Image (spheres, rainbow, N blue to C red):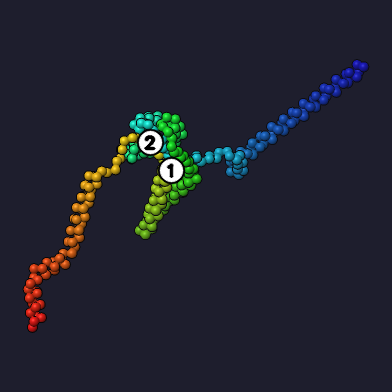
Amino acid sequence: MRILLFGFLLLLISCGQTNSYEDRATIETASDYTGNDLKMDQQQMADGSAPPPPPPPPGENISAPVTKVIKTGSMAFGVEDLGVAKLGVDSLLAVNGAYYEKEEYRTAYRSVAYALTIRVPAANFETLLAALEAGTGTLTTKSISARDVTEEYVDLSIRLDNKLAYLEQYQTILKRARTIEEILEVQEKIRLIEEEIESKKGRLKFLDDRVGLSTLQLTLTEDTDAYVAEEPGVFSRAGKALLGGATNFLDVLIGLLYLWPFLLILVGLFFFRRPILNLFRRSKSS
């Protein structure tokens, strides 16, 4: 029995040593392989023969263009007190960083109104609309639109970059030009490219302005009982008629001045009518 137990223990010990030898060999082989690979990679990088890195995953390191949207709108309100309503709009514009691009006061039959063109930062456009609807007056009309100009903006930016690159190339060519003809030809190319660059820059600036600042057409109207804009009275119409008649009379006189040769002939015939008649009678009697 003791002999069997002793033999079993020897078997376990030998198996453990064998596994340790195999693990050690595996680790040494792996370390040798890693070192060889590292040396080979370094040599390839030094020689410039290393393969290019794998492409990035889809969507990585690709910056999408910023969305460019032009927001415009028009609103009309009926108000009880035009002055108070206008002051309320003034305060809303100050809070939202907006300003009046155009302000027009109108009077009509039994009504007075403000026609306002407002420029407001695009981020505050919806906030201003909500504030106007909440406390300005009775909303009568409303129209809001948004136009995406991202494609146009990106296209213009790419074309502008290309034109700038062309301009740099032609400026380099100009430095190498030798004859007057070559210089004039390259200068004409540069002039045309600079005109296109300025045109594209101007369009991009306009789009940036329209995207950054939204436009709102706002109308405030107050109905009144008084005749704010009355029809002209009888005396006013009579005065206009007299003035119009005098103007027409002067026009006729000026027109007659263009006929002065004919008038001169008629005046001569009037003053010399008797000698002419006597001469005519004598010739007839003879």
Crowding at dot 1, Cα within 10 Å, few <14 / some 14-19 / many 20+, comes out as some
- Picture quadrant of residue 35: top right
Q: Amino acid at mark 1?
A: Leu
Residue 196: x %, y % from top left: 41, 50
Horizontally, is 228 left or right of 150 in the view?
Answer: left
Residue bearing the label numbered 2 = 220
Q: Residue at x 43, y 43 (%)?
A: 207
Which residue is at the far right?
1
Q: Earlier in the sequence, mark 1 or mark 2?
A: 1
- On the question of residue 175 being in view, the answer is no
In front: 153, or 26? 153
Residue 39: x %, y % from top left: 63, 37
Task: Tell which tag, 1 or 2, sits nearer the viewer.
Answer: 2
In front: 169, or 222? 222
**Residue 276 drawn above or below residue 93:** below
Residue 147: x %, y % from top left: 48, 43
Q: Residue at x 20, y 60 (%)?
A: 255
Residue 126: x %, y % from top left: 46, 34
Q: Residue 207, labelled with which disc?
A: 1
Horizontally, is 43 left or right of 177 in the view?
Answer: right
Q: Quadrant of the C terminus?
A: bottom left
Which residue is at the far top?
2
Horizontally, is 3 left or right of 168 in the view?
Answer: right
Q: Residue at x 13, y 68 (%)?
A: 265
Q: Secondary structure at mark 1?
A: helix
**Residue 141 drawn above or below residue 16:** below
- On the question of residue 246 being in view, the answer is yes
Q: Secondary structure at mark 2?
A: strand
Q: CA distance from mark 1 to mark 2?
A: 29 Å
Q: Amino acid at mark 2?
A: Leu
Horizontally, is 262 left or right of 100 in the view?
Answer: left
**Residue 9 drawn above or below residue 199:** above
